[in-house]
Amino acid sequence: MNQQATTIQAQASAETGIWAFILADMCIFALYFFIFAWDKSVHPEQFAQGQATLNITFGGANTIILLISSCFMAKAVQAARLSDVARYTHYIRLTILCGCLFLVIKAVEYSDKLAEGYHVASNEFYRDYFAFTGLHMLHVIIGLLVLGYALQFRKDKQAFSTHTLFIENTGLYWHMVDLLWVVLFTFIYLVP
């Protein structure tokens, strides 16, 4: 097998791998959404009361921040494909900034809920709220770590071009994280 065929095969494996991971992760979250809907059907008053205590402004701001971060990530991927290290660096940094801002707002929201006496053991609503948004927050943290690693590629322009597939896969992961938040925000904050 020649070098080009080996490279194409490796790229196909990497693309298949990220899509398999995304599919598996989405299936896990689909199960969580089913659990949330089930718990809500069993305890409708408790969920209505819990939902009324949430800060829609925080949730909405985080939604907007993550949607903007997805735009920045797409621009970073585009810059990587064009080997434009300066633009890539700029947009990766903006994506990281948005992710950090998301975490700060979520930390403030969590601290507000804890100060009000709500926690995982309060009831089924708060168990689901903290579990599902906490798992999503873990995904954001993992994404930020990967983005931090991907930012290091800017230091070597020659090596930078060989990491485009990794950057594209990082973008796919980041978009999945954003999509999951939009669904979480809708289910937990908005749908009565």
Image (tube, rainbow, N blue to C red):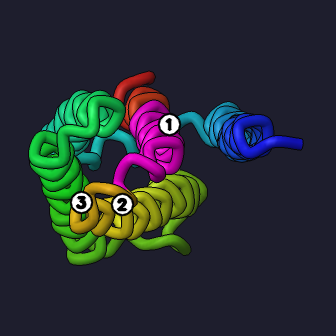
Does dot 1 land on a helix, a strand or a loop? Answer: helix
Foreground pick, 101 / 160: 160
Circle 3 crowding by C-alpha within 10 Å: few under 14, some 14–19, many from 20: some
Can you tell which of label 2 and label 3 is closer to the viewer? 3
Circle 1 crowding by C-alpha within 10 Å: few under 14, some 14–19, many from 20: many
Q: Which residue is mark 1?
A: 172
Name the N-terminal-most of marks 2 and 1. Answer: 2
Residue 143 lies, in percent from the top left, at 42, 58
- Three-letter amino acid code at disc 3? Arg
Is residue 20 visible in the rendered image? The answer is yes
Q: Which residues are magenta?
A: 160-181
Residue at position x 36%, y 60% in the image: 150
Cα–Cα span, label 2 and label 3: 8 Å
Quarter that holds the C terminus: top left
Q: Which residue is mark 2?
A: 150
- Three-letter amino acid code at disc 1? Leu
